[in-house]
Image: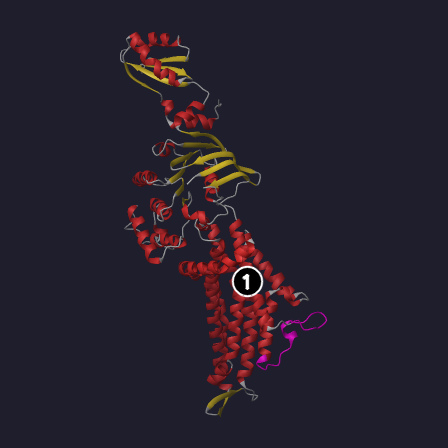
Amino acid sequence: MNIKLEQVTKNYGNVQGISNINLEVSRGITGILGPNGAGKSTTMKIILGLSRPSRGRITVNGKNPFDDWELKKDFGFVPEYDCFYEHMSGLEFVCYFLRMHDFQREEAEKRAREALTELGLEEAMERKINTYSRGMRQKTKVARATVFNPRVLVMDEPFQGADPTTRMLLMKKMTEWAENGKTILISSHILHDIQSLTDNIALINNGKMLAHGNRHEIRNLINIPRPITIVPVKDGNLRKLAKRLLDEKWTKATSIDEDTNELTVETTQTEDVYLEIPKILQKEKITVERIYSEDDSLDSLYAKLVEGHQWK
Amino acid sequence: MEIIDKIGKLPDIVQSFAKRSKNLFPPIAKDCIYRLLVNKITWIVVAILLLPCVLGVVIYFQTDEDRQVRESNGEKVYYDEDGDLIHEDAREEFLNIFDLFVISFVAIIMAIIFSSELINEEFENKTMQLLRTTPIHPFEIILHRYLAGVISMFAILGLNAIIFYYAVMMPSGTHGILENLDVLLMVLQILLFESLAFIAIFCVFTTYLEKPYLVGIIYWIVWESFVSTQNYQQLTITHYLNSMIFNSTKAMGWDVQASDFNLVNSNEEILATEPFTAMLIIVVIAILSLILASRGIANRQF
């Protein structure tokens, strides 16, 4: 399934939901990352055909999901919010939606039992949903969305309210589903959830797409120096090394932390740095404990993007 | 050419729709009927409906001794103190009270409540968003809920009509009760068509409006209560229901005038519609309303 958003804008009256979003989603997991109110849910609703773009074009396999009801056979949706028939049991709820997908009663019940059992709800599936914990509700939503084996899974904040066990179980299942060829779109404002699932990330803030790609590609779009930290084995090498590195054209600045015995180089040419530093260290006969860049983590990228750093 | 192609495919579409409905209707109806029956307001309405029935029973026991009984062809026929047949007065009382209290008032309130519970609640609980991500067509979303609403409303009001009929006709004995079953059948027919029409109309309100209760009540007071007595009353459902009652009672040999049912214009000309035409118009209005409501669901953005 190929999902394509071209210059999609959605306005709610005078309020702008998203603006000129371009995104192409194909097989595997794609994470949509952004703070609350960034436009993640709006983007997902447009993909699901729950909302029509004010401008731009959305196509799923070349068709418009807002008008094409047949297309919805292939969509599984896990909403961010609770939307249950609270008087039903988990089993009845999942069965009910399977019937909407044209499954006969017996087949629907069999599949619903399997899906709920797989997600660890075998004990609770006959209980009414209004007695469920948040984690159980989350699992029920996921079971409902995946039970008919859709080709596309759209999951809006699927880990919200989930305990660590549920979180790990859901992550494991998502990885399995992706390996089985599903197209999975996950939104989250929790970076680590996305980071541990995929490297294919779309960053959204204030309704605008800030970046799309893997985190290194995204990092390279940011036009600010990136810190790389070197920790030598012996004390006393720091100043010598700092002085030597300052001679390099790719070094913007260096700083030393003598308490932790760390030297930090700021650069905009990361790849050159990673190639050159080992050579310099070898020449200067300096042994290092480790070289790292915290800036590689999604946390720092996210912080930078959301704080509004300039782009190349 | 495209239209001809579409018409050609119509039998297949209808067949596939009927096949899908067999699978879709039972779970939707079960859920909707359950929701309607556990709704507190439904039970308040049921309690209100039972009040006249209780009153009828009380009146029966208070006037029981005033009745006179005569044997006719082996049957007991009851007369009042003045020597008039009790069942002839009782059937008129039944129809008048039921028309005024249930057909013109409670049934419409019930249709507003039911359509709101069936459709508006799904928007508020956001389950409609989930339904919109399934391959079920908006017309199917609305139709099965509508049918569940009609069945529930007709069952409650029909049962109430039977109880009320029995309570009012009790003084006339078994003879009176059986003699006037055609009045009860007519009332049941009216209730069925009233349920068909009003739930469909209020479904339109609930799909397009944020506050369907309020608009529904305004519609009832302004349109169905006021306009239905004016020259353009053919634009109201009440006109067709009144026409059905008027024609049926006339066919049963009652001494009724069109003006008794407000079926005249300002020049005192009779405006009553033929019963079959009235029924047909109600069904057409219901179908058009459902199509309109399904467009409302299809175009609703979340």
Q: Quadrant of residue A254?
A: top left
Q: What residue lies at 32% left-to-right and 11% top-to-bottom?
A: A279
| Visible residue check, residue A236 | no
**Frontmost residue, A26 versus B101:** A26
Q: Quadrant of residue B40?
A: bottom left
What secondary structure is the stretch in magenta mostly built from? loop
How busy is the neighbourhood of tag 1: few (under 14 within 10 Å), some, or many (20 plus)? many
Q: Look at mark 1 in the image and give the residue it sits on.
A: B286
Looking at the image, residue A160 lies above or below residue B54: above
Looking at the image, residue B226 lies above or below residue A141: below
| Residue range corresponding to the magenta coloring | B251-271
Report in which chain the residue with disc 1 lies.
B
Where is residue A181 shown, x and y percent of the image? 35, 40
In this picture, residue B283 sits left or right of residue A214? right
Where is residue A24 shown, x and y percent of the image? 45, 35
Query: Which colour assignment does the render follow?
Result: secondary structure
Which corner quadrant holds the N terminus of chain B?
bottom right
In this picture, residue B256 sits left or right of residue B120? right
- Residue A42: within the magenta? no
Looking at the image, residue B183 lies above or below residue B121: below
Where is residue B147 shown, x and y percent of the image? 47, 62
Q: For the residue marked with disc 1, what is the amino acid?
A: Ala
**Frontmost residue, B24 versus A263:** B24
